[in-house]
Image (cartoon, grey):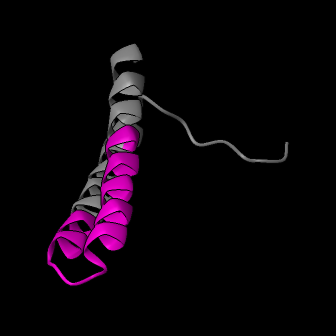
Amino acid sequence: MVLGKILVIVIFLGIVAAMGSALYFLVKDRGDSDRLARALTWRVAISVSLFALLFVFWWAGLIQPHALYP
């Protein structure tokens, strides 16, 4: 399960990197190019893949949901 945790962290860092590059393109290009939209599209795609990975981990029994309040 350690590999799964590392994979989730790497994917999360990819989401943050895509958001950072979108911010950079927003400031640098002033929204005039397609690079901003492409970076945000990547962020959404990576986020969906993270959700799917977490769902597969839950389905396989590798992670268990828990209540916030006991």
Q: Position of residue 14 (x, y in %)?
A: 31, 43
Q: Tell me which residue sits at (32%, 40%) in the image.
A: 11
Q: Dominant secondary structure of the magenta stretch?
A: helix
Q: Based on the picture, tell me whether residue 39 belongs to the magenta stretch.
A: yes
Instruction: Report the residue that reaches farthest toward the right.
Output: 70
Q: Tell me which residue sits at (38%, 23%) in the image.
A: 6
The quadrant of the rendering that contains the C terminus is top right
Q: Position of residue 25 (x, y in %)?
A: 28, 66
Q: Position of residue 8 (x, y in %)?
A: 38, 34
Q: Based on the picture, tell me whether residue 68 belongs to the magenta stretch.
A: no
Vertical placement of residue 34 versus 56, above or below: below
Foreground of the two, 8 or 40: 40
Left or right of 57 on screen, residue 38: left
Instruction: Report the residue that reaches farthest toward the bottom.
Output: 32
The quadrant of the rendering that contains the N terminus is top left
- Specify the quadrant of the image occupied by residue 28: bottom left
The reply to whether residue 59 is visible in this rendering is: no
Left or right of 37 on screen, residue 30: right
Number of residue marks: 0
Q: Tell me which residue sits at (34%, 47%) in the image.
A: 17
- Specify the quadrant of the image occupied by residue 22: bottom left
Foreground of the two, 1 or 23: 23
Left or right of 32 on screen, residue 64: right
Vertical placement of residue 38 versus 21, above or below: below
The reply to whether residue 63 is visible in this rendering is: yes
- Specify the quadrant of the image occupied by residue 36: bottom left
Write down the region rendered in magenta: 12-41
Foreground of the two, 64 or 41: 41
